[in-house]
Image (cartoon, helix red, strand yellow):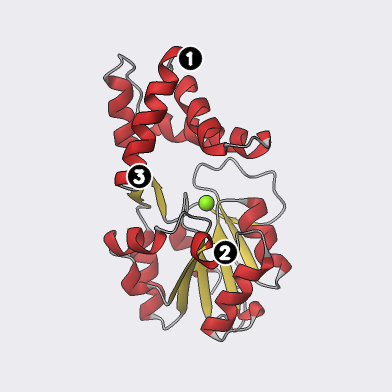
Amino acid sequence: MRVPFKNIRAVLFDAGNTLIYPDYAFVQKLLAERSAEVRIETLKQLEFEAKVAAQSSQVQKPWKEYFSHWLTSAGMSNETIPELLSILWNRHREKNLWSVLDEDAIKTLAELKRRHFLSGVISNSDGRVEKQLSNLGLSKYLDIILDSEIIGISKPDAGIFKIALNELDVKPDSTIFIGDSYKHDVVAAQQVGMHAILFDPLKKLEHHDCLRINRLTQVFDFI
Ligand SMILES: [Mg+2]
């Protein structure tokens, strides 16, 4: 049994790989058309590994690094990668690829609202996160949606967290931030004085010294 935090007023979330995921079924179909049958569960695991690799590689184009890693680990040859990257990039431009809701996202946000908590999203995105969350039916539960592209400040910079605190008129120690990146979400939120919880649905981040949940609904153990 967890000891809940005291006096929590707001619960804020990262978006990508916390509330919304890439369209695994679209990627699965691309692979199947090239004779690679990969299960969605396997694609999720491989995507996680690709994300970790891209984050640690310090390359100029993490998007390219991330998808190349993901596709090759799923069985695609190096020669097919440029064509696949262009298909994925076009799809992402037309219709944000991060388009699949976490299975607990709506349930969790609706329950937060029912219990009169403020909630919101702080996302390192490309200017489209608000529209995407609205299309997916999440905006009505959210009091604030901050997109780094629009604000001009990205996580882990404290500035974007401070804007959220100001706009919601809450103190950092009355706020919980939940996200899947130890550096950009957990450590960054803690630096402004928020409570932070690492979202680890695949249970692969147990080496980090912080609070962790693997289902979004587990936030209710803390409030
Ligand atoms: Mg994320």
Is 54 placed left or right of 143 in the picture?
right
* Disc on res. 93: 3
Q: What residue type is labelled 3?
A: Arg
Q: Distance between the residues labelled 1 and 2?
A: 35 Å
Outermost residue toward the bottom?
169
SS state under label 2: loop
Which residue was labeled with disc 2?
A: 152
For disc 2, does the CB lie below 8 Å from ligand 1?
no
Q: Which residue is drawn at 45% across and 24% down?
A: 71
Residue 207 location, x and y as percent? 69, 43
Question: How many numbered tags mark residues here?
Answer: 3
Q: Nearer the viewer, mark 3 or mark 1?
A: 3
Q: Quadrant of residue 155?
A: bottom right
For disc 1, does the CB lie below 8 Å from ligand 1?
no
Q: Upstream in the sequence, badge 2 or badge 3?
A: 3
SS state under label 1: helix
Q: Upstream in the sequence, badge 3 or badge 1?
A: 1
Residue 13 location, x and y as percent? 50, 64
Is 109 placed left or right of 195 in the picture?
left
Q: Nearer the viewer, mark 1 or mark 2?
A: 2
Q: Which amino acid does label 1 sit on?
A: Asn
Q: Distance between the residues labelled 2 and 3?
A: 20 Å
Q: Is residue 180 above or below residue 72?
A: below
SS state under label 3: helix
Relative depth, front residue between 40 and 138:
138
Q: Which residue is drawn at 70% across and 71% down?
A: 192
Residues at badges 2 and 3 in contact (C-beta under 8 Å)?
A: no
Q: Which amino acid does label 2 sit on?
A: Gly
Q: How crowded is mark 2: few (under 14 residues within 10 Å), some or many (20 or more)?
A: few
* Disc on res. 78: 1
Q: How crowded is mark 3: few (under 14 residues within 10 Å), some or many (20 or more)?
A: few
